[in-house]
């Protein structure tokens, strides 16, 4: 059943409605924090700000704590309310989304740690353009995925899913360029490897944003599209 035609917001228990809305609210708050973590980690690298990078690493504990809190809230809802249909899908989608957001937080911490090492070694320049481009792309995917979750917007979610392939292509192009540069200048190997790890972390952020968007389709349509070719999505959704 399509959640947009369901009456999941019309429960007899107002408290149940409140609990479901709280889950969404807390997930959006976690998403906002994680998005800022990614932004700050990249900014720290590009601006050579090691103190900002250190704050990103320190804030990873806050991200973990938010996931634990959301998981606890979801467990209580499942135990006390025994939700069904769209309500159950909402709780499950929140649990899955919180897990992906926590992993994005981990990737932000990896970026920050690599940034600290590069800054300490006074390395800069090569690969920064690629980092900026891919980081802007995956952060936009994150924002759109979270917005689609908040609005139950499957069209926006599908746009995110389709963009993931573009990020993969940008990542592969950047990696080939950096590999060529390392082969031409052996002295660049160590710093360029650091940039490669950062690009890999950003590509993973895009993967997790894609997952968030897929959960929206599951939540709204009841369809699991995790292993569906993006080119076949319109047809599959049209049949639902």
Image (spheres, rainbow, N blue to C red):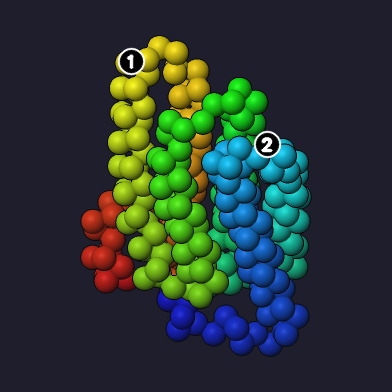
SS under mark 1? helix
Camera sees residue 103: no
Task: Locate residue 7: give its quadrant.
Answer: bottom right
SS under mark 2? helix
Relative to residue 73, is residue 37 drawn left or right? Answer: left
Crowding at dot 2, Cα within 10 Å, few <14 / some 14-19 / many 20+, comes out as many
How many numbered markers are drawn?
A: 2
Relative to residue 7, is residue 21 drawn left or right? Answer: right
Which residue is painted at 57% across and 67% down in the image?
Answer: 90
Which residue is painted at 61% across and 59% down in the image?
Answer: 31
Instruction: Pick the residue in front: 179 or 89.
Output: 179
| Quadrant in the picture for the N terminus | bottom left
- Seen in the picture, residue 148 relative to 64 is either above or below; the reply is below
Task: Locate residue 236: give its quadrant.
Answer: bottom left
Which residue is painted at 55% across and 61% down in the image?
Answer: 93
The x, y position of residue 163, in whole percent, is 34, 55
The x, y position of residue 121, in whole percent, is 61, 22
Q: Which residue is mark 2?
A: 50
Instruction: Pick the residue in front: 37 or 116.
Output: 116
The x, y position of residue 186, in whole percent, is 40, 12
Q: Earlier in the sequence, mark 2 or mark 1?
A: 2
Camera sees residue 55: yes
Crowding at dot 1, Cα within 10 Å, few <14 / some 14-19 / many 20+, comes out as few
| Quadrant in the picture for the C terminus | bottom left
The x, y position of residue 91, in whole percent, is 61, 64
Q: Which residue is mark 1?
A: 183
Which numbered dot is residue 95? none
Q: CA distance from mark 2 to mark 1?
A: 29 Å
Instruction: Pick the residue in front: 43 or 211.
Output: 43
């Amino acid at each position: 059943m399509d959640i947009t035609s369901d009456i999941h917001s019309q429960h007899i228990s107002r408290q149940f409605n409140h609990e479901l809305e709280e889950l969404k609210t807390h997930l959006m708050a976690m998403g906002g924090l994680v998005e800022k973590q990614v932004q700050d980690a990249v900014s720290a690298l590009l601006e050579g700000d090691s103190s900002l990078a250190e704050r990103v690493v320190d804030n990873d504990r806050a991200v973990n704590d938010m996931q634990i809190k959301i998981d606890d809230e979801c467990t209580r809802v499942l135990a006390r309310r025994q939700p069904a249909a769209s309500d159950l899908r909402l709780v499950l989608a929140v649990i899955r989304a919180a897990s992906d957001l926590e992993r994005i937080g981990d990737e932000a911490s990896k970026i920050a740690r690599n940034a600290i090492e590069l800054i300490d070694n006074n390395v800069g320049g090569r690969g920064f353009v690629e980092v900026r481009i891919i980081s802007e792309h995956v952060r936009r995917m994150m924002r759109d995925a979270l917005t689609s979750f908040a609005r139950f917007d499957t069209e926006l979610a599908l746009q995110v899913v389709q963009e993931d392939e573009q990020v993969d292509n940008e990542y592969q192009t950047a990696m080939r360029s950096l590999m060529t540069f390392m082969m031409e200048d052996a002295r660049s190997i160590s710093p360029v490897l650091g940039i490669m790890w950062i690009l890999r972390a950003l590509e993973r952020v895009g993967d997790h944003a894609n997952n968030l968007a897929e959960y929206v389709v599951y939540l709204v349509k009841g369809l699991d599209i995790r292993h569906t070719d993006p080119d076949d999505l319109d047809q599959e959704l049209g049949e639902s």
